[in-house]
Amino acid sequence: MQLKEFKKNKLTEHDIELYRTELNELYKKKTLDNDQLFIAKTQLLNNEISKETFKTMKAENTRIAKEFTTSLKTTKFKDNLKNAMNVVKSTRAENQDYIEANEELNYAKQLYEEFRLIVKEKGRSAKILKLSDYAIEIDHLNFRYNAEFPLALKDVSFKINHGEYIAVIGHNGSGKSTLSKILIGVLTPEKGIVKLFGNVMNSQNIDQIRQFLGIVFQNPDNQFIGSTVRADIAFGLENKRVEPKEMPRIIEESAKKVRMENFLDNEPLNLSGGQKQRVAIASTLALNPDILIFDEATSMLDPKGKREIKEIMVELRNQGNKTILSITHDMDEILNADKVLVMNNGELIRYGTPKEVIDEEGFLESIHLGIPFIAQVEKELKKAGFKINKTNDMDNLVKQLWKN
Ligand SMILES: Nc1ncnc2c1ncn2[C@@H]1O[C@H](COP(=O)(O)OP(=O)(O)OP(=O)(O)O)[C@@H](O)[C@H]1O
């Protein structure tokens, strides 16, 4: 085969992505159908369904299983690799196509390796590929709850690099929760695009794309399912059909990240608010999402609980492999963030560093938000005649006061 012809017909990452989705879908269909057949078996024994119905269901189950096996056995990636090998063989070393042919061969090898991995996992942990370093991209987003209602989000656009910690602030009703609901695919925009790691969110890929996301809600009491902390963290893993033998390690590791490893056998309901919220974070971390959304996760906690959760968020941010989006009313929290996204009346009105947002004279007050406590202290000290250089760090402020 010639290089030109190969290039025209070769498989790409796109084919791998489609295959991954296809196998994942077939796997889900097969598992669901197995569950239904299992129930039907009991119904048959209790004479609740006829033999005929059961037979039809069994035939359908066999068909689905076959479809899955056929997909597993596809030879297209191997054939693609063979073709690439033939191209290299038919290209002479002195020919300038030789380098290109070898590049194609390497690419085809990579695709084949990826294919083997997908087959090994049987699509179970099929994960959509990361096509961009931006964890989140929102482009000209409009949303309204009802045709007669005004826009709850108006032409919102922003980009978040993977690994950044973003605080989302804004007065009540400014559109923060609406934005987070769109991000997790609960609401569909009227106009505009949402991309996670370069993948445009749509109704076909929503299940897969959600694997990038983990969310921690406001009320820790509404987030428990298990009777112990361990069972609670395990629940999400079971749902995701993680290998049972992998679970104890994952549970230990995620509990450690939130300093709850000594509470694994405790009953969640007897924990403090902050501890409960830490368990909720551990359950989310266990699923290893790339993006963590904290939806007013500290608002129902006492000061100690708030502090605990904010510390964990900073630690997660410093570990560097998670994007954190925190919707918050806690103006002190914004000092921990890399950037602050300010919403007002459904519009994104500022997107900058905490310093930029806080230092803009009168800005936060103009949208009925307070300035962080430390910034307020600085302001009052200046008014009282102290010479203070702007800092957002309490230790630094105290040092400066000693010098005054
Ligand atoms: N289910 C709904 N149906 C109709 N309108 C809604 C609904 N939820 C929110 N809204 C409206 O959409 C706008 C944005 O609300 P949203 O809840 O996103 O604000 P928010 O910034 O999260 O507020 P808060 O800080 O109070 O949680 C508001 O005008 C609100 O009244």
Image (tube, rainbow, N blue to C red):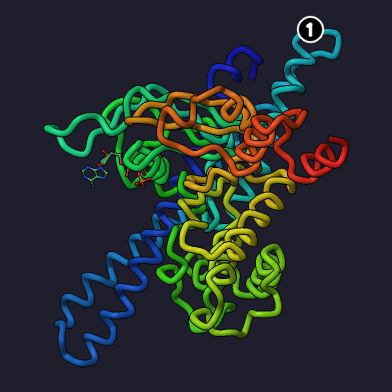
Up-down: is 12 above or below 330?
Answer: above
Q: In the image, what residue occupies the spot 60% across and 20% down?
A: 6
Question: At 62% across and 54% down in the image, what residue appears?
Answer: 310
Front in this rendered view, residue 59 or 89 = 59
Please name the residue shown 86% across and 42% down the image: 402
- Residue lying furthest bottom: 46
Let me know if residue 131 appears in the view: no
Give whichever of 390, 21 is nearer the camera: 390
Q: Is mark 1 within 8 Å of ligand 1?
A: no
Check the image and name the residue furthest to the left.
148
Quadrant where the image shows the C terminus: top right
Residue 266 x/y as whole percent = 59, 84
Q: Which residue is mark 1?
A: 96
Query: 78 above or below 308?
Result: above
The reply, left or right, for residue 158 in relation to residue 182 is right
Task: Report the image quarter containing ligand 1.
Answer: top left
Mark 1 packing: few (<14 Cα in 10 Å), some, or many (20+)?
few
Q: Position of residue 360 (x, y in %)?
A: 56, 22
Q: Is residue 116 visible?
A: yes
Is label 1 in a helix, a strand or a loop? loop
Residue type at tag 1: Gln
Location of residue 88 in the rendering, given as x and y in whole percent from the top left corner: 75, 22
